């Protein structure tokens, strides 16, 4: 499989500003330009997959088909052991369709009311996919996992999604209290994207 080339433009199958910022920072060294699909007129697909990888492939294929460019998509979310892995693939809409980050955080903390700290283990999962074109039969698939636990109240404002309630044991703070470079080094998305960048750049280095 050929890798991406310096100067290439890739469509990101997301309009999430926080996600775009993280991915742009990590791809800057490869001189690969990333555009959110909204700037290219790509409509949002319906996420009908039952797993992170199914949804990531569905989103990447949709973005590649509408833009004519190679596409990167990720599907990510948080798995909470006390909730049998929920919210999982429904993390972005845990509190219902169109839910805000604050709505989802509130829903999660309510669901964990009365659960003691040792039983609040959780992890962020990220499945990231690169497709050279919409009919790519061998999409590149990378995974990152970030272990932690759920706090009793939000802390910090440098992040998005569930970051304010995700406690990072090695740093003794929430994901939203981490500097961006530290978060990119540790996070599920950072892990998956570094693996992807390494594999994409393999043809050029």
Image (cartoon, helix red, strand yellow):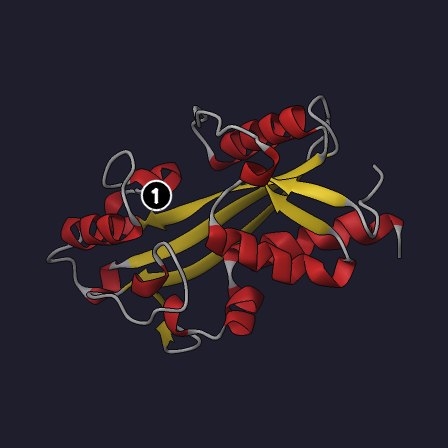
Q: Please state which of residues 147 and 205 is positioned toward the viewer in this rendering.
A: 205
Residue 110 shows in this picture? yes
Secondary structure beneath disc 1? helix
* Residue under label 1: 91
**In the rendered view, does 174 fall on the left or right side of 57?**
left
Q: Residue at the left extreme?
A: 114
**Residue drawn at (69%, 57%) of the image:** 27
Q: Please state which of residues 101 and 38 is positioned toward the viewer in this rendering.
A: 38
Q: Please state which of residues 174 and 99 is positioned toward the viewer in this rendering.
A: 99
Q: Position of residue 146 (x, y in %)?
A: 47, 59
Q: Residue at the bottom extreme?
A: 172
Q: Quadrant of the C terminus?
A: bottom right
Q: Quadrant of the N terminus?
A: top right
**In the rendered view, does 202 fall on the left or right side of 180?**
right
Q: Is residue 53 above or below residue 17?
A: above
**Residue drawn at (89%, 52%) of the image:** 204
Q: Where is residue 67, by image quadrant?
A: top right
**In the rendered view, does 201 fall on the left or right side of 50?**
right
**Residue drawn at (19%, 55%) of the image:** 109
**Residue drawn at (63%, 25%) of the image:** 66
Q: Is residue 61 above or below residue 38?
A: above
């Amino acid at each position: 499989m050929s890798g991406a080339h310096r100067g290439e433009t890739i469509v990101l199958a997301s309009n999430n500003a926080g996600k775009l910022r993280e991915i742009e920072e990590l791809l800057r060294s490869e001189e690969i330009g990333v555009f959110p699909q909204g700037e290219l007129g790509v409509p949002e697909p319906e996420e009908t997959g039952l797993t992170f990888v199914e949804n990531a492939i569905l989103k990447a294929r949709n973005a590649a088909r509408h833009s004519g460019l190679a596409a990167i998509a990720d599907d990510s979310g948080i798995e909470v052991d006390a909730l049998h892995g929920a919210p999982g693939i429904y993390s972005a809409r845990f509190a219902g369709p169109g839910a805000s980050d604050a709505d989802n955080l509130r829903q999660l903390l309510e669901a964990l009311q009365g659960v003691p700290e040792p039983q609040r283990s959780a992890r962020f999962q990220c499945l990231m996919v690169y497709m050279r074109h919409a009919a790519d039969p061998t999409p590149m698939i990378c995974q990152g996992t970030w272990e932690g636990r759920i706090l009793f109240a939000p802390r910090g404002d440098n992040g998005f999604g569930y970051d304010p309630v995700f406690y990072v044991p090695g740093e003794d703070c929430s994901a939203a209290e981490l500097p961006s470079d530290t978060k990119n080094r540790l996070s599920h998305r950072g892990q998956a994207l570094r693996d992807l960048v390494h594999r994409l750049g393999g043809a050029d280095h």
